[in-house]
Amino acid sequence: MIAELTVERVETFAVALPTLRSFGVSGGAVATAGRPSVRVLVKVSADGVCGWGEATPIPAWTYETAESIVTTIDRYLAPAVLGRPCWDLDGVTSVFDRAINRGFTIGSPLAKAAVDTALHDLLGRALGVPVSTLWGQRRREELTLGWMVSGQAPSEVADHVAEGRAAGYEAFKVKIGLRGEREDLAVVAAVREAAGDDAPLWVDANQGLSVDAALRVSRELHRLGVTAFEQPLPANDIVGLRRLKDASPVPVALDESLRHPSDLATFVRLDAVDVAIAKVQRSGGLTLSRRLCSLAQDCGVRLMGSGLTDSDVGLAASLHLFGAFGIDTPVDLNGRQFVDSVYADGVEVDGGVARVPTGPGLGVTVDEPTVRKLAINVLD
């Protein structure tokens, strides 16, 4: 019976996956063509059943590295959950906070997310149902994906957008803050011209701007028909974000600012948020992400969805979450654009549309021999 399943083993595998394209944010490189992309996969086992989760180390985006994720799970999170009931997801969140305290952040959210997601996968597999069935919540069967534009010069944008269109994508997201303000805006303008006036288009600065620069940029983005301006200011600049939210003609979306549901509660109380970005790894897993999404919808805050260039395990987790809450705008789940998930099968992506998996757990079949073959020692 599911009530009798207890965590018996937690294993980590840092795997080197083929990188398809280079990708950067305002903080630096995320993926580099010709160099493998490292993802940390987690396997949780209980009485012959196992589940898988994923962490995506991006030091250019947040402080967790492949090394820190592996040691955090192996030395702190795994000992904290061994012997605990697999179904007690709320209790796991509490013991995680005791093992790695929140402090001024949520406390190693990528590492926690991998274990939490693996437990969801395990529970679904033990019951033979998808994660969405566990939740009793599945409002969408398909989600529209956005094609990422990042690092291209204005003169290169048309070809890159054409590549996305040829692959079936009709929505586009642009990373700015990589160059100067003028060239950033030139890139966005080039995307709008190449994509057409009707294509959904949103912009992400990844905390790279000042308030004054963000105000200037937002006026130009409005002229270009941009639908959302994502995380223009540093995550903890609540005063600046409130000022920008009040003055920006483009809705301001918060990503890095929303580590925990309580962060969203703060921004709601201060009337400093237009749009909340749901992101599984940033919020420490599916358990806390569901709380954040429910809070946003209960408070009338619009939800958008994003990921961390996840491979297919992380992609599936996000699809279940976003489908559960019925997110109807294009989502930034760009892993398939940049990383080859050679170890997994089960996620259906047809052009720019992804189906919420229907198999047990996350609905992803992980080839463990391939995982072990791809595994590298990141601690040497």
Image (tube, helix red, strand yellow):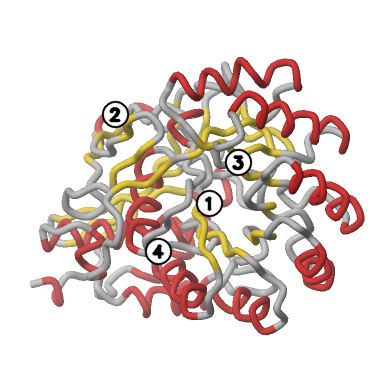
Occupied quadrant, residue 336: top left
Is 22 situated above or below 122? above
Residue lying at the far front of the rendered structure: 197
Residue indicated by mark 2 = 370
**Toward the viewer: 102 or 256?**
256
| Comes first in the chain, label 4 or label 2 | 4
Q: Position of residue 240 (x, y in %)?
A: 84, 67
Tag count in the figure? 4
Q: Position of residue 85 (x, y in %)?
A: 25, 75
Mark 4 residue type: Leu
Q: Nearer the viewer, mark 3 or mark 1?
A: 3
Q: Tell me if mark 2 has few (under 14), some (14-19) or many (20+) residues whose alpha carbon lies within 10 angstroms of its own.
A: few
264 left or right, relative to 354: right
Q: Secondary structure at mark 1?
A: helix
Residue indicated by mark 3 = 201
- The image quadrant where one finds the C terminus is top right
Q: Secondary structure at mark 3?
A: strand
Mark 3 residue type: Leu
Mark 1 residue type: Ile
**Toward the viewer: 340 or 152?**
152
Q: Secondary structure at mark 2?
A: helix
Residue indicated by mark 1 = 69
Residue at 78 percent across and 35 percent down: it is: 178
Residue lying at the far right of the rendered structure: 212
Q: Tell me if mark 4 has few (under 14), some (14-19) or many (20+) residues whose alpha carbon lies within 10 angstroms of its own.
A: many
| Comes first in the chain, label 3 or label 1 | 1
Distance between mark 3 and mark 1 Cα atoms: 33 Å
| Comes first in the chain, label 2 or label 3 | 3
The numbered disc on residue 207 is none
- The image quadrant where one finds the N terminus is bottom left
**Toward the viewer: 108 or 317?**
317
